[in-house]
Image (tube, coloured by chain):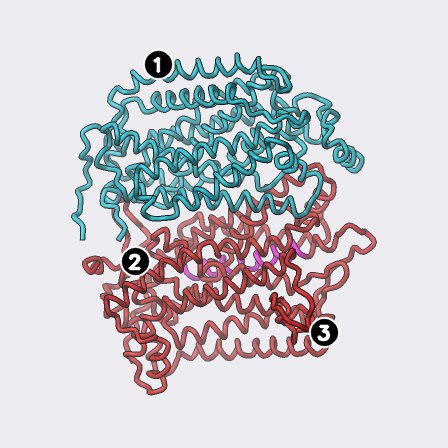
Chain colours: A red, B cyan
Amino acid sequence: MASVNPAIDIDNTNEEPGTRAPLVLGGLDYAGVTETVCAPWEAENPPKIWWLILAAALSLLLVLGGCVNHLLMKGVGVWGNNNPAYWGWPIVNFVFWVGIGHAGTLISAILFLFRQNWRTSINRAAEAMTIFAVVCAGLFPGIHIGRVWVFYWLFPIPTEHLAMWPNFRSPLLWDVFAVSTYATVSILFWYMGMVPDIATFRDRCKSKIGKIAYGILSLGWTGSARNWHRYEIAYTILAALATPLVLSVHTIVSFDFAVSQLPGWHTTIFPPYFVAGAIFSGFAAVVTLLVPARALYGLQNLITLRHLENMNKIIMATGMMVGTAYGIEFFIAWYSGVPNEQFAFINRAFGNFWWAYWIMVTCNVVIPQLFWFKWCRTTPWFMVIVCIFVNIGMWFERFVITITSLCRDFIPSSWAYFHPTGIDIMMLIGSFGLFTTLFLLFCRFLPVIAMAEVKSIMPHGDDHH
Amino acid sequence: MHETRPAKITSDVVTLNDGHLKAMPLLLGIGVIGLLASFILSMFSSAGGSAFERFSFIYLVNFCFVLSISLGCMFFVIISHLTRAGWNVTVRRLAELFAMCAFPLGILFLVILLPVLMGYDFVYPWNQSGWSAHSIEQAEQIAALDAAAKPPIEQLKGAYLNPMFFSIRAIAYFLIWGAMGAFFLKTSLKQDDSGDVILTKRMQALSAPLLILFAVTIVFSSFDFEMSLSPLWFSTMFPVYFFAGAFMSGLITITLTAMWLQKNGRVTDEITTEHYHDLGKLTFGFVVFWGYIAFSQFLLIWYANIPEETFWYDYRINTTGWGIWSLILVVGHLFIPFLAIMGRTARRNRTFLAGAGIFLLVMHWVDHYWLIMPQMDAYGHVFTFNPLVDIPCAVGMIAIYIAIFCFVAKNRPLVPLKDPRLGEALNHAVH
């Protein structure tokens, strides 16, 4: 078993103007980086805590499976969805998970184009998390359609016997395109970026099955100059393709709401506001996962405090963008003079669901302000707490938008309070089981950090350009 | 591999070198003549309203055009410090100077503000009680709103849209922008002498709260200066739209100014093709961002088809003249530049990038024209474009703006001399 680096945090968050703080600490050289990243994978047995979390995650996954089965047997009536809240928790969960699935591609694509070197230590795990979040997201609309066995009707597939097309004017169909494109490109990007590292695993793997599996996955990577040349071109092109996708997915998701005429849903700032919120929640999820992961696997020298601090700054910035959007919405609701709009927003803050609204504001706008204090954004255990609050807040944001507006539609006689069922709650919790299971398997079997990319930004790596 | 350049300024001339003394009187002369010519010619303009109304509108278009450039540059400065950017140090001073120009622009705004305070409704219809009764186009919506809501729409909006509060806000914006511009420019100039690292740290520390202040002012100033021209209309996206165009035009102005200075033998060594390439990339990014925001705003309003919102677009699309203008905007502000500056070769070619930049600035002007001018004839169905009035005004305003730039720049260094990250910018190269 390779030695694990001592789990201490070196403070590299102070950057004197004119110098750049190192992003790889502990005096690691190329070999050191490889050893550090490979150590947890080469360990004969994963740490006990890994098994414990996996057991818990699998239990939750079982709960999810049971719920889905129950739903398929009984129909969507097992959810709390009802007139007038035809859209209930499933949509809330869908938007929540899609939102989380935004950080990975932002880190890999947009931060790559902005030449933010610090992205290299976190992009792999963030991308993996993105894909797993999209899997969770895809589940909810997938089982919401009622007749799951004909899910392929979602796609415009020409058939002879099925004389109908999906409604091209519906943003729900655009969602199908947007999310499936996003999932495809994200997986492609993630996998392509991983090829050199999988080759490293192939070369170091001791078991026969492992050698074959990683051998196939590494696509015959030799590490030759030609390989690298192609790799870098492909990476840049994929980054450029993925960049508009970071914006498009949540833009389309926001269209689901904003193209309607429902007060509280129809407001033009929704697209950028949703994108900012998605990045906000996505980064919070990355921090929540990486802080324990780096402690468990001794990755403090690669995922340094500086990486965490940078992410927390982005969380703070996007959180304030979201807060600004809340403010603009409120102002314009008043300014518009449209009584329905005014009512919708007053109802949000002071109506039946006031508690949800204030949970949202507290978690999304107030709590991230703690990151103004350096201690708060550089203390790992503390930032995890803040980030968990952020994700609670972002779930409630979707809840507030979806439920409060629907429960006060244009026909007062149908106004009602929304009650989730036990299945609703268990499915949300269960989806965390799916997410966590996938992430734990990723941590065990694939390179958690993009070794090759980290090496490219190390100071002595510059000579090789 | 490339040689590492020492972090030293090597150009012979890094200031305007008294060029501004010659240029300023000339520019101010052109400015005054241009504005006067526009005013006089607007008397002969047949499109409805008084001459002063016609002139005020085109004046506001040009004012918002130059103001947005300054605000774009201010954002450039703030975000550079916030992200501790190193690559753009050598062009940051230009942005600082243009950002500082926002404050003197406040004086030019008096042409709009004073009539508002005196109770005229040349530009802002909400300044005259009974405006809602005059808007024949939206009579139905207003009647419906008045019937449904208490207080009636005019009274409700009067709490925000009244001359006193409007003026207080306008003055506050210019004071805030002035203070922010002065802070960054003064601190940066101070560093030219001392090279003190503390100054960079101070600017970094303050950039975060100042960005919030910037966001608040740009949100409400865009509502006030442009959106309230149609007091009934509202869109939460409007500030983002304004910002997208502003930042794009700011980037272009920095690029064009740097090119012009280099052509005239100033700051020759410090700004390289790499910087232009990156500025071009950012410009491209914000061309697309503008398109994204413009399209999203349009799509949501078109799709929901609520009369309170659609009339604004309806008029701009379905009126003779304005329909074509809208088309020019979409094609010229998005499609053409999208294809033109997507390629790496195009962005690294200075002549080409300069041409694309000038074209985009024209389109940015077209954009403000499209936002503002239709409100002048909204009730008369007349397409207002009149080059005899509009072009002298644009030339005049831009000349005055450049004069302001000269006044702000004086003989100050046009590049930070001792910024701690100067070396990074000088050695900026993309591997």
Q: Quadrant of residue B321?
A: top right
Residue position marked by numbered label 1 in the rendering? B25
Residue A75 is marked as 3
Hey, which residue is sitting farthest right in the picture? A413
Disc 1 secondary structure class: helix
Q: Is residue A80 above or below residue B142?
A: below
Q: Residue A313: horizontal and vertical position, in percent?
A: 43, 51
Q: Residue at x 35, y 38 (%)?
A: B203
Q: Determine whether label 1 and label 2 are within 8 Å by CB.
A: no
Residue position marked by numbered label 2 in the rendering? A23
- Judging from the image, mark 1 belongs to the subunit labelled B
Hey, which residue is sitting farthest front in the picture? A160
Query: What's under tag 2, amino acid-wise?
Result: Leu
Q: Is residue B197 magenta?
A: no
Determine crowd level at label 2: few under 14, some 14-19, many 20+ residues with C-alpha closer than 10 A: many
Disc 3 secondary structure class: loop
Tell me how far mark 1 sits from mark 3, CA to CA: 79 Å
Residue extent of the magenta highlight: A378-402
Q: Quadrant of residue A394?
A: bottom right
